[in-house]
Image (cartoon, rainbow, N blue to C red):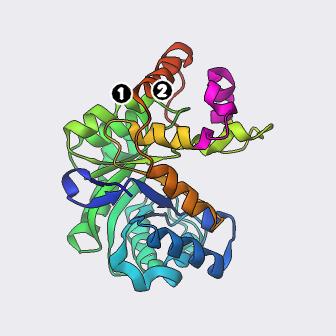
């Protein structure tokens, strides 16, 4: 497994991280989650990324691998609060709710601090008010997180970077989501931010014959039908897609989730196989430039 220096944080992160959304949202249960997370850590994955709103993802992580806390960098997000704090009836970006959400996350994760606390995609308008930024800065001063980050895309991400506040950026990067490669990532690199690629295999949307209009993967499904990458018909399409994202300059780690323990080994093998050949990477970029519409913005 390759490890990269995570920007100005100085953390050494595995190029493949584990995204915790699927174990929460697919209801895998304690035993299966433990098998998945244990296999990930045993294989050298040292980035675990989750969020308070990913159903019981944080709790599953806390229950199954808190005893191995020194083996991984723990990232979570605040905002879009659900579940235990709904009764407070506060707006999701109310700083009072964020503070309680952060404490709830630490309780769920069975730790006294996370390595990275990220604001979960507030808009530029919301960021400009300053109160949500102060909420995560307060958490950092209190020792509840080592670093703070922003998760989001496009103009919102650009503002977050230019604010000079954040240590890291989580942003969409994939074969079906390349806006950030020219617009955002060079700026993040210039400012020394650690970069996490979210949705790095475009939700594997090309494998599906139909996608409901309400489905999270619908936009990527539509885009890929227009992009018509030849390699998507090949058995190693997943490998090509993930290696493309890991070959993008400025990306330090790409988070891939799964609800199936058997997939961990295959994902690690792909991530360990190195960058795409330059000609193949350039061909994917060229096809995007040829086909992509002006409104193909980064997808949250």
Q: Residue furthest right?
A: 210
Horizontal arrangement in the rendering, residue 165 relative to residue 88 (left or right): left
- Find disc 2 in the rendering and name its residue: 280
Relative depth, front residue between 198 and 155: 198
Q: Specify which label sits upstream in the sequence, 1 or 2.
A: 1
Name the residue rendered at 62%, 30% in the picture: 231
Classify residue 143 by image quadrant. Answer: bottom left
Relative depth, front residue between 148 and 22: 22
Is residue 3 magenta-colored? no
Secondary structure, magenta segment, majority class: helix
Distance CA(mark 1)–CA(mark 2): 21 Å
Q: Residue furthest top?
A: 290
Q: Residues within 10 Å of mark 2 (few under 14, many from 20)?
A: few
Secondary structure of the residue carrying tag 2 is helix
Secondary structure of the residue carrying tag 1 is helix
Q: Please name which of the two marks, 1 or 2, marks the residue nearer to the observer.
A: 2
Classify residue 128 by image quadrant. Answer: top left
- Tell me, yes or no, if residue 110 can be seen here: no
Residue 113 pos. (x, y %): 32, 76
Q: Residues within 10 Å of mark 1 (few under 14, many from 20)?
A: some
Residue 93 pos. (x, y %): 44, 57
Residue 289 pos. (x, y %): 48, 17
- Find disc 1 in the rendering and name its residue: 183
Q: Which residues are magenta?
A: 219-238
Q: Residue furthest bottom?
A: 67
Horizontal arrangement in the rendering, residue 7 relative to residue 16 (left or right): left
């Amino acid at each position: 497994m390759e490890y990269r220096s995570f920007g100005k944080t100085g953390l050494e992160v595995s190029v493949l991280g584990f995204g915790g959304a699927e174990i929460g949202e697919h209801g895998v249960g304690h035993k299966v989650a433990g098998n998945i997370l244990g296999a990930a850590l045993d294989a050298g994955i040292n980035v675990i990324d989750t969020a308070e709103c990913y159903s019981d993802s944080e709790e599953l992580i806390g229950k199954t691998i808190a005893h191995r806390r020194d083996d991984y960098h723990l990232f979570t997000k605040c905002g879009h609060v659900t579940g235990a704090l709904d009764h407070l009836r506060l707006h999701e970006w109310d700083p009072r709710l964020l503070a309680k959400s952060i404490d709830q996350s630490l309780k769920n994760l069975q730790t006294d601090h996370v390595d990275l606390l990220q604001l979960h995609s507030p808009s530029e308008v919301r960021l400009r008010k300053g109160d949500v930024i102060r909420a995560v800065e307060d958490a950092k001063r209190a020792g509840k997180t080592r670093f703070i980050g922003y998760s989001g895309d496009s103009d919102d991400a650009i503002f977050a970077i230019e604010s000079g506040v954040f240590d890291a950026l989580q942003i969409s990067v994939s074969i079906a989501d390349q806006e950030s490669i020219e617009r955002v990532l060079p700026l993040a690199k210039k400012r020394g931010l650690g970069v996490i690629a979210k949705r790095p295999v475009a939700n594997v949307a090309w494998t599906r014959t139909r996608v409901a209009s309400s489905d999270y993967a619908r936009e990527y499904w539509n885009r890929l039908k227009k992009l018509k990458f030849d390699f998507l018909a090949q058995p190693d399409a997943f490998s090509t897609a993930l290696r493309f994202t890991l070959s993008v300059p400025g990306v330090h780690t790409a988070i891939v989730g799964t609800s199936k323990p058997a997939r961990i080994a295959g994902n690690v093998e792909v991530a360990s196989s190195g960058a795409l050949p330059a000609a193949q990477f350039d061909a994917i970029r060229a096809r995007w430039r040829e086909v992509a519409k002006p409104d193909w913005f980064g997808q949250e």
